[in-house]
Amino acid sequence: MDNIAEHNLNDKVGVIAFNIDGMHHALVASILGYEGGIGVRNGCFCAHPYVKNLLRVNQEDEHKLTEEIKHGDKSNLPGMVRASFGCYNNEEDIERLVDMLDRIIKKDYKGEYVMNPETGVYSVKGFKLDVEQYFPLHRKSQISGEQMYPESA
């Protein structure tokens, strides 16, 4: 590898931040997680001023958002979806992400998603998490899917 190519690879990171036009970032992230098994992050990624600048959130919008949050409504929080790639990811993982994004754009997802305005999080209506399936030593009486995801009822 020559010096130019090596230098270019060293300056790269495996992170892609994006939005899908007309869809809330939290909805896209939830669909990817629930239906694609793809873990992404959404929101402002601890870089609120930068992301708000990228999204062109003006001072008037900022004031409106602050008032909504004060009144317990986080449904309009600005943000983006971030997919991060590590050394363990392969081309199949990227193809799966691209396929899921294509399905989302075409509105070809299966779940009925409901946002909890207090948290700004989307859940699948009727989804129940079977904690014992993943944590067999964890007593069901201590935590249930309904307690973890009350907005999915």
Image (cartoon, rainbow, N blue to C red):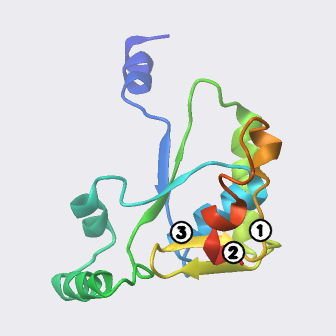
| Nearest to N terminus: mark 2 or mark 1 | 1
Residue 102 visible in image: yes
Residue 50: image quadrant is: bottom left
| Residue 152 position within the rendered picture, expressed as x and y whole percent measured from the top left | 69, 74
Relative to 13, 98 lies left or right: right
Q: CA distance from mark 3 to mark 2?
A: 15 Å
Q: Which mark is residue 152?
A: 2
- Number of numbered discs present? 3
Label 1: which residue? 127
What amino acid is at disc 2?
A: Ser
Amino acid type, label 3: Ala
What's under tag 1, amino acid-wise?
Phe
Element class at badge 1: loop
**Alpha carbon distance from label 2 to label 1:** 6 Å
Q: Secondary structure at mark 2?
A: helix
Please give the label number shown on residue 81.
Answer: none
Residue at x 62% of width, y 48% of height:
39
Relative depth, front residue between 100 and 62:
62
Identify the mark nearer the N-term, 3 or 2: 3
Q: In the depicted view, which residue is nearer to us: 58 or 152? A: 152
Q: Position of residue 110 (x, y in %)?
A: 83, 73
Q: Pointers 3 and 2 in contact (CB under 8 A)?
A: no
- Quadrant of residue 9 in the image? top left
Side of 152 where 42 appears, left or right: left
Residue at 64% of width from left, 80% of height from top? 114
Check the image and report above or below for 24 versus 35: below
Q: Residues within 10 Å of mark 2 (few under 14, many from 20)?
A: many
Q: Which residue is label 3 attached to?
A: 26
Q: In the rendered structure, are the residues bearing label 2 and label 1 in contact, judged by CB atoms less than 8 Å apart?
A: yes
Q: Cα distance, mark 3 to mark 1?
A: 17 Å
- SS of the residue at dot 3? helix
